[in-house]
Image (cartoon, coloured by chain):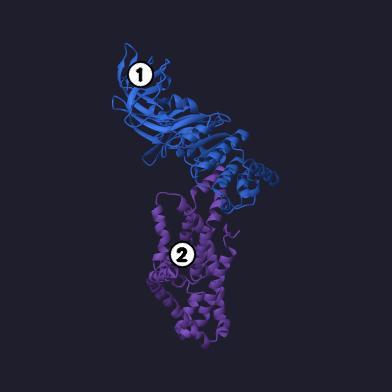
Amino acid sequence: MSFGRRRLFGSRQQTAELLIPAVLGGLLVVYFLLPFAFFLWRTGSVPIVETLAQPAAQTAIRNSLLTAPVSTLIATVCGVPLAYVLARRSFRGKRLVEALVVLPLIIPPVVGGAMILTAVGRFTPIGAVATQLGIPLTDSLIGVILAQTFVAAPFVVITARAGFGAIDERLEQASRSLGYGPLGTFWNVSLPLARGAILAGVVLTFARAIGEFGATMMVAYNPRTMPTRIWVDFISGGIDAIVPLALALLSITLVVVAAIQRLGRVPTVIDR
Amino acid sequence: MTLDVSGLTHQYGSKLAIDDVSFSVGDGELVALLGPSGCGKTTIVQAIAGHITPTAGTVSLRGQAVTAQPPEARGVGVVFQEPTLYPHLTVAENVAYGLKAQGMGATEREQRVESVLALVDLSASHDAMPTELSGGQRRRVELARALAPKPDILLLDEPLSALDRALRRQLQAEIRRIQAETGVTTLVVTHDQQEAMSLADRLVVIQEGQVAAVGEPRELYHSPPNRFVGSFLGRANTLEATGVDRTQSVIRVGGTAIEQPDLPETDQPVVQIRPESVTVGSADDSSADEITFSGQVVKVSDVGTQYDIEIELPTGERLVGTAQRSPPGVDETVSVGIDRRDLVVFDE
């Protein structure tokens, strides 16, 4: 009996302990859910498939699918080594580099886009040379990639850096003493062990890149990607007009994120 | 000489970690680098392995200076204090890791892995993941991984510190056996004097970043070159000599005059005597080398295997001696016997 009573008391006490976090957290979850649910509510009254079949929507989907993976790839190929250096070395100006990495997260994407324009816009030296060579850096898919990379790359750098930082440096020292140089050690030890963190960063970067609007609008309003198309449709047709593309964007992102997580699932020790 | 360390000095920022450290390790020798925690032992090992670049000094392996070479070019096997097995690889893959770097073929590699795992008695764990092993087994896999590429020298940095006492004893014996079987030149770092003395052919004792003594364990234990080494290698009573009579070659210790043919340079020398060399009770006057004190028992502690008896001498100094059975009572006046040859005299 006494055991039962204590159990009861214990569970009541636990409920009381969890009350405050449950209420506060619940508020936030409800706030995430409400707009999402009401937005999806409208799908019933909108012809989704027909709208997505239109050439304008098709082009936007194609452009987004062309650019976001490339931006993610660039961010990963350059960002992961940067993350490693930041996690392992101290050097003069490291603070500055770290600040620069975080900068795109702090400034509004529209301002980021404006900054990109001042650097590589059509009438800047770099932009002019590129245009002459037939590779325009603005109002082109390359422009879209530049904007997406600028805004999204910090995610993979910051996440991968945390991943590398969590690896005991002695594991790398052991590899060096076993005959591998810095590159071999990075490839055989650091990379596999930080894989989970890197993939999390890749997922975040991809999601951010494919949904990028502010900077893309400034640098390459044309050709349209899904987010810029959504904006144009909203101006001309209101909320109902954007439901199909928004749903498509959401689905693509979900599928890619799930695929990366599934394919790249770190074979943890417990799994094996 | 397999390893020669000469004038090794290293600073972390403005803090001097090791200062002008020199010693060498001969072919097939097992040497222990012994010192208290934070004395710079790990810094020395890291400099030998090439994981840090020393501020000054040279490291030579097989007669060649390697101070400027990266770790992968040195042929030094390392086992760290913390576990460094790769969690994403099996036991066999961990052991084969260094062999792959040498470009060894798959068949030969597998043979070497088999033989090294047999050496550490872990053939059955070939395909296990490191997390499935016990702490002692993991240590042995690390040993196997370090030995597999046949390094010129094996560095063991506090390899057993994280293990419990029984396992530590067992693995000490294993390390001795493996070292004898492979004949690999080994430098083992430890802060545990018992471990160092039972493992090593020779000790290098480090105190605050400097070499305090080099020598065989027994020799350093019984005739330490300085007070630090004497008290670090085992329990020791330290008494101040009150008077030096140079005409008669006599020093006064604890109220008793002791003949000392080798008089120290200073007028205030210090003597050390180990508790197990202090006989309490029946003094054996028959031996010419026996010195007898008289004193009062202050404290008797039963430490399980023996009794520790603390005695106050006429000078007020205290001395710890031991008795196997029937210890005297507190406040009893007893005679204390010391063999002259067990007394070590230091200048300061």
**Label 2 close to label 1 by CB (< 8 Å):** no
Q: On the rendered structure, is B320 left or right of A138?
A: left
Q: Which residue is mark 1?
A: B264
Which of A263/A234 is in front? A263
The residue sitting at 54% across, 77% down in the picture is: A248
The residue sitting at 42% across, 49% down in the picture is: A91
Q: Quadrant of residue B336?
A: top left
Q: Mark 1 is on which residue type? A: Pro
Circle 1 — which element? Answer: loop
Instruction: Give the x, y percent position of residue B248.
Output: 33, 11
Q: Chain of mark 2?
A: A
Q: CA distance from mark 2 to mark 1?
A: 76 Å
Which of B46/B222 is in front? B222
User: Is A108 rendered above or below residue B136?
Assistant: below
Q: Quadrant of residue B282?
A: top left
Task: Name chain B's colour.
Answer: blue
Circle 2 — which element? Answer: helix
User: Is B190 rendered above or below residue A38?
Assistant: above
Which of B347/A197 is in front? B347
Classify 10 Å Cα crowding around label 2: few (below 14), some (14-19), many (20 and above).
Answer: many
Q: Which residue is the extreme one toward the bottom? A: A45
Q: Is residue B244 visible?
A: yes
Task: Name chain A's colour.
Answer: purple
Instruction: Give the x, y percent position of residue B194.
Output: 48, 34
Q: Which residue is mark 2?
A: A150
User: Is B134 rendered above or below residue B70?
Assistant: below
Classify 10 Å Cα crowding around label 1: few (below 14), some (14-19), many (20 and above).
Answer: some
Which of A239/B280 is in front? B280
The residue sitting at 49% across, 75% down in the picture is: A227
**In what quadrant of the picture does the C terminus of chain A appear?**
bottom right
